[in-house]
Amino acid sequence: MTEEDSETVFQRHKGIGSQVKQAYEEAIGQMFANLNRSELDVFEAIFKEHEDYDLDTENLFNRTRNLMTKVVLEMNRCFFASNDVDNKLTTLEMLKEHFAPYEGKDWNFNTVSPEKLTRPLRMRHLDFSIGFMEGQLKSQEKQLEIAMAKSIENRERLQDVQNKRVKLKAKIEQQLSQYQNIEPQLNKLDQLINNMYLTTENK
């Protein structure tokens, strides 16, 4: 039974709690119906013996019966409210419907094979193993994310260094090109300086 099916069955049996509560209240209402006013005759006789007026047994009887009924009804209400009887009865009806196909089956565990007896334990162990492996996978995924983040950061640093090298190389090549352009002029200037020096020496 899927979760959706369970919810549907649960809602179908939702009113069972109210029905049971009403049945209890009706039974409680009849609980003291068989009381007889004559049961107070003894008390009435004793009262007459010691008092100057008659005991109103009719009124006393009705008040006592009503009070007892009220007390038991209140106890019943508290029981249903404090023990969540409504939901528990609904759940019970849902489970009864769910397991109805198994009614009347032999549940003698002495005839069950060891494999079937240990199946719940093995399934629980399997669930635990799967949960443990899932935890390991999540931990490894986290470590992989951290490693990938560091790798990306290192690649970015390497790329930054490479970009700086390219820029520096371009700047050096630019300066070399500029030097090559002015080299003839520098040679002429150097030659001119040498000639001036030689002329001065000859004088």
Image (cartoon, rainbow, N blue to C red):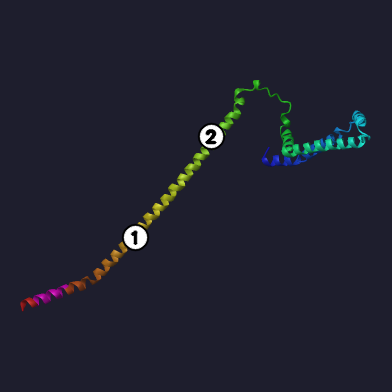
- N-term-proximal mark, 2 vs 1: 2
Quarter in which the N terminus is drawn: top right
Using the rendered view, name the quadrant where residue 108 is placed. Answer: top right
Helix, strand or loop for disc 2: helix
Determine the residue positioned at 27% across, 69% down: 178
Q: Residue furthest left?
A: 203
Question: What kind of residue is marked 2?
Answer: Ser
Q: Position of residue 7 (x, y in %)?
A: 70, 41
Q: Are marks 2 and 1 in contact (CB under 8 Å)?
A: no
Q: Residue at x 5, y 77 (%)?
A: 202
Residue type at mark 1 is Lys
Q: Which residue is mark 2?
A: 129
- Residue 168 location (% of width, % of height): 31, 62
> In x, y percent, where is residue 146?
45, 47
Q: Is residue 181 magenta?
A: no
Pointer 2: residues within 10 angstroms few (<14), some, or many (20+)?
few
Q: Main secondary structure of the magenta part?
A: helix
Depicted 33 relative to depicted 181: above or below: above
- Residue 110 in sight here: yes
In the image, 201 versus 12, the foreground residue is 12
Residue at position x 39%, y 52% in the image: 154
Most foreground residue, 19 or 177: 19
- Region in magenta: 190-199
Position of 16 compared to 175: left or right?
A: right
Q: Which residue is mark 1?
A: 164
Res 87 seen here: no
Camera-side mark, 2 or 1: 2
- In the image, 153 versus 76, the foreground residue is 76
Q: Picture quarter containing residue 162? A: bottom left
